[in-house]
Image: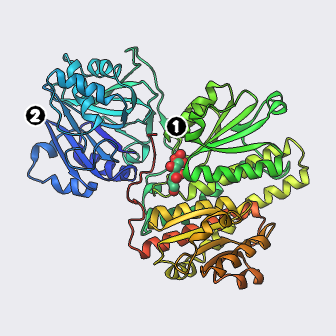
Amino acid sequence: MCGIVAYTGSNPAVPVLLNGLRRLEYRGYDSAGIAVNTPDGISIRKSKGKVSELAGLLGEDETQIAESTCGIAHTRWATHGPPTTINAHPHAGGKNGIVLVHNGIIENHHALRSTLTAKGYEFLSETDTEVLAHLVDSHYQGDLVDALTAALKEVHGTYGIACLSEKEEGVLVVARRGSPIVIGVGEGETIVASDASAIINHTRQAIYLDDHDIAKISQNKIDIRSSDNVPVSREASEIDWSADAAEKGGYEHYMLKEIFEQPEAIRNTIRGRMDSERGTAVLSGLDLSPRELAELQRMLIVGCGTSMNAGLVGEYAMEDFAGVLAEVEQAAEFRYRNPIVGSRDLVIAISQSGETADTLAAVREAMDKGALVAGLVNVVGSTIARETGRGVYLHAGPEISVASTKAFTSQVSVLLMAALKFSRSRRMSVEQGRRFVREIEAIPELVERVLAKNDEIAKIAEKYVDQTSAFFIGRGYMYPVALEGALKLKEISYIHAEGYHAAELKHGPIALLEKSVPVIALCNDGPGKDKTLGNVAECQARDSRVLGIVTEGDEEAMAAVNDYISVPPCPLHTAVIPSTVALQLLSYHIARLRGCPIDQPRNLAKSVTVE
Ligand code: F6R
């Protein structure tokens, strides 16, 4: 949510900042801005809308801006104040020429604004960030680090900040609490960003700041301190994916590229983690001591949105195979309802970004209550990965499209591996374990077979493009698929969509069915199919057109629905993945036909770092 880039070095800053913003635009895209040190002070340019509009403002005749070698930039997802040019970052504070960009929320901004107004500060915008800029100015006595350190002591809330002062040319000061800051260490230059995708073109050496760190960066020096101004050491680590991984690679949209990357992403997720001889999965991040294992009472899975939907598959598999009591909970709810959780519970936090505020808060709550906590995270070095200390990386590669696709299928793959691992340490025989290993290893090929139907799915999408509302239904393992299918459709095509348990439809939502409201039914062959086909008939009796996800060769299911997409035969716990891929493609094509901005749907941002 919001993207920050900053640069100091010997090259012109503006191209680095603009390229970085383009990479981070998926985090927020309602306005953008840039500020650079020039011999005449700090120049700020901002604009409503996308980064391309900001780039258009930076005319070639602005020599001082073009020649600057130090600056900060921001792409915004509005929290306080609508997406206008005035509310766009950077914001300037007071008389000392303090300019900053911020990702996060200053919760006590009202109180601070009143105090600063009483001191004579004038506000131009409605943002919490401008409060921060004036606050830093109010503490400035010639040293930006000291001023920021003092200001942050008065602030409640979350922040990733990059700050300039016109009195300290070439110096960047950055700080984090709750919102990520990565420092890319180059040769004679430093690039700071909200995530590694904005720095990978310049360097692979990254330092991930911890909460409460404040860093002063000049061309050749990075000095990191704690909030008490004590020097701290943070090792640089190597970013292990290439710049190409964050490009569209010839696809029209990142989402389509990421859908097509899934066979490879899943292969990377399971690589080196399957032990076919012992019929188990090797996930050292989920190793429990014999005592912890013996005492394990329950697994609690927390996440938001798509990650929570993946968690539901994990719940089913864990109970189904391992006989471990498992529950999924919305991370946002977990934190505030004072859950009963303790040292005999394993809490698994699922998050693609590893930065989602509610999931992070749930992790902290679970740790405070003494639970065992593991992260299931894609972004290496992210806050959840670091705070949990144990867990499993997805290795799905960067996910740029706001709508999550390959992260979901990698998450489900890990959860199936976790179910296998726990099952084998309990009741499952080696033979059953070996079969499970083969089923998981078959997933990438199952996905390839669905991707081969892309053109067919695009044709089916044409029939569903004009709807205003749709229902997705499924039962058992296909229930989370229905939830995920509906989420994908609504977020990228703006068609109102609801995912329901197939049986639950009759308890209310069926009242909404009519000719113009289609139903997408997960009718995969396996336990529960007959009942779902019964529900399909109920929908058709209310004039709804039914699109079925069916198993290849299942004539009965094909005949029962109006249209179908077939997926390869496989057990239902793995059918979750190819079936979801079919629905991802369906949503993608519907949204494309409707002319929607697929990679950047309105009002959304990739990484939700505010509650
Ligand atoms: C939907 C989507 C969101 C995220 C949710 C959690 O396509 O992307 O629902 O799944 O915001 O994000 P992470 O997984 O980064 O914690």
User: Where, by quadrant of the figure, is residue 113 drawn?
Assistant: top left
Give the crowd class for mark 2: few <14, some 14-19, many >=20 residues within 10 Å: few
- Residue at 16 percent across and 26 percent down: it is 121
Reading the image, the residue beneath label 2 is: 39
Give the crowd class for mark 1: few <14, some 14-19, many >=20 residues within 10 Å: many
Asked whether residue 582 is in view, the answer is no
Which of the pair 473/165 is nearer the observer? Answer: 473
Q: How many marks?
A: 2
Q: Secondary structure at mark 1?
A: loop
- Residue at 30 percent across and 53 percent down: it is 30
Ligand 1 contact, mark 2 (Cβ < 8 Å): no
The residue type indicated by label 1 comes to: Gly
Residue 273 higher or lower than 40, as above or below: below
- Residue at 85 percent across and 45 percent down: it is 424
Residue 226 position within the rendered picture, expressed as x and y whole percent measured from the top left: 41, 19
Which of the pair 560/413 is nearer the observer? Answer: 560
Reading the image, the residue beneath label 1 is: 381
The residue type indicated by label 2 comes to: Pro
Asked whether residue 534 is in view, the answer is yes
Residue 12 position within the rendered picture, expressed as x and y whole percent measured from the top left: 21, 43
Image quarter where the N terminus lies is: top left
